[in-house]
Amino acid sequence: MRFEIIYARLDFEIFTNWIGKKHKNVVGEILAGFSQFTGKKHKNGGMETREKVTCEQYRELFENASDWIYTINIDGQIVAFNNSVVKALKCNSVQDVFKSNISDWMTPESLEKANRFMQEVIAEKDFYDKSIEIEIIRKDGEHVWLEHKARPIKDKNNNVIGLHGIGRDITNKIRLEQELKESEAKYRKLFENANDGIFSHDTEGYFTSVNKTGVWILGENDEKNVVGAHFSRWLTPDSLKIALEALKKAVSQEITNISLNLEIVRPNNEHRWIETNSWVVKDGDRVAGINGIARDVTERLELEEKLKASEALYKDLFENADDPMYTHDLKGNILSMNNIGMKILAVTEEEIIGSNISKWVTPESYKIFEDRVRKIFLNQPLEKLVVMEVITNTGEHKWGEARTRLLRDGNKIIGTHGIMRDITDKVMLEKKLKESEEKYRDLFENAQDGMYVLDNERNFLSINRFGLQTLGCTEEEVIGTNISKWITPASMKIVDERRLKRLSGEMVDAADVIELVCKNGEHRWIEIKTREIKNGSRRIEIHGIARDITQNRLLKQELKKSNKQQKLLCYLIQGTRGGKTRALILKHLADGSFNANQLATALKMDYKTIRHHLNVLIKNGIIGKGNNGHSDLYFISNNIEMTLNDFNPESIRNR
């Protein structure tokens, strides 16, 4: 048999036609049924009202009831119903409901439940006390839930001819129950799978519930080992005293929230620290128990201890470091500085802390600081090292090489931590070196001899002005070229032999004469002296000095041809006093230019004597005089035609 609950209007004419004249007593049954659901009991076990109610009054009650009131026949057809049924089923008219079957409005599961319920009602098995919850499908497809009660309708022969029912919409209740069930399941899952221990205990300290994490924190492997046990089982004596005191205050309602750090002892005697946050649970005005959350903070406390030790160590390193250390905010206000930093600045802690960096650096160095702050705000990379010029409290200027890192509060940059190395000595040396380099660069460029630097392949790295003038070239035309471009093959052979001797460790002549080919094709002779520049045992450069001796060579050649000069020389050497000395002077000058002091030393003679003979030779045009910027240099005059290699004072004297 199909069975379904439906809601509609009661059309008394339709209902009367269905009942038939011989079943008019059924109307009384239905009306009595109404009385049953209003809670009015009959003296003889049936139902009665406190006063006589007319059919019209029941009709009004029936039509305007907020609950669904309906009647179905034995086949499940709906034959009577009130307005609430029509509205609830979202029907347009009573015809949509009348004589429809309850199976048209019910889900299969609810239909099966309703059929069983109907059988119990027909069998009159405690139907007054029973109700069922069934799921209805409205005309628009929406599902609603109904709490249903029914009683059988019988004819005069006591045969069941239908059911009369009342239903109440409990959709909101069902939904709330479902949401509550889902919420309970959700929070049960959160409870069981929380990373923190969650627990409850009564006012005496006996656990009433605990989650898996709580069981693990206590070192147990089963919830049964915890629930029902007193928390004193796991607490050290000191922690138990703290916990009991807090519980006493909570029960007396002195406090409602409790935060404690407690030491527990697991069954394996392992000691752990837990942080608990708990609150009072009340039943009315009475404290019923305590709910709480516990977190194992053993590792955190150990890390805090290590951090304290580390901070103490860092502070010691900070204060006693050999290099200045400091911190400042992004405005340049100094937050901290160690002892050596204050010592270098000649300040006290009170003088430095809170002061601005601009007070202690030069304007140029402060611009460097401002540029770094700008880059920080623009998220641009910073230089790893910066050099700052510092002004001490006494006005002394010092230089420091600073290495910095950013200080952060979360993701926010709040300042800078720096380590500065005092490089004042280094800066001063670099300044002196620079001054020295400038000085020797000036000497290099303005020397009266050619000066040059070659690499290991004998390519020019640099050459001074005099050397360029000798070659008749610009610097661009010479730098990078090989020396072989500017000397004859015979002279290149001399250079190669000199190089091989150096490589083999042999002694080389102090100077060599090579033949130079100038840019315009002119040949000139230069006397070169070289020295190697090494990095460790490796040669990296060759420095050379070249003196133009073209005129000296020509003079030697001309001396051979000049009889007049020969006679003059013979006279000065043989015919006058001091001739031997003058001969020795000329012999030395034939090898190069010397000053008077060098000649006096070489000949082991008195300086004044040498100067006298030099003046005699100059007066007679035998020698010339120049100046190298330090002293007078003497050399063979251009008009002497005899070669000094052939000059022999003894032969001239004999002559």
Image: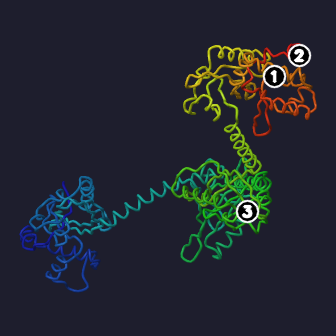
Image x and y of residue 346, in percent: 80, 62
Residue wearing tag 3: 240
Asked if labels 2 and 1 touch by Cβ distance under 8 angstroms, the answer is no
Q: Residues within 10 Å of mark 2 (few under 14, many from 20)?
A: some
Mark-to-mark CA distance, 3 and 2: 127 Å
For the residue pair 150 and 596, the one nearer the viewer reads as 596
Mark 3 element type? helix
Q: Nearer the viewer, residue 532 or 602?
A: 602
Residue identified by numbered label 2: 653
Which is nearer the eye, 617 or 17?
A: 617
**In the rendered view of the protein, which quadrant contains the C terminus?**
top right
Quarter-of-image position of residue 83:
bottom left
Q: Reading the chain from its start, which is encountered first: label 1 or label 2? A: 1
314 left or right of 4 in image? right
Q: Position of residue 108 (x, y in %)?
A: 24, 52
Element marked by disc 1: helix
Labels 3 and 2: the sequence-earlier one: 3
Q: Answer with left or right where residue 393 lies relative to residue 462.
A: right
Q: Callout 1 environment at 10 Å: few (<14), some (14 to 19), or many (20+)?
A: some
How much space separates mark 3 and mark 1, taking CA atoms?
127 Å
In front: mark 3 or mark 1? 1
Residue type beneath disc 2: Arg
* Picture quadrant where residue 348 is located: bottom right
Could you say which disc has been placed on residue 568 in the image?
Answer: 1
Circle 3 residues within 10 Å: few <14, some 14–19, many ≥20? some
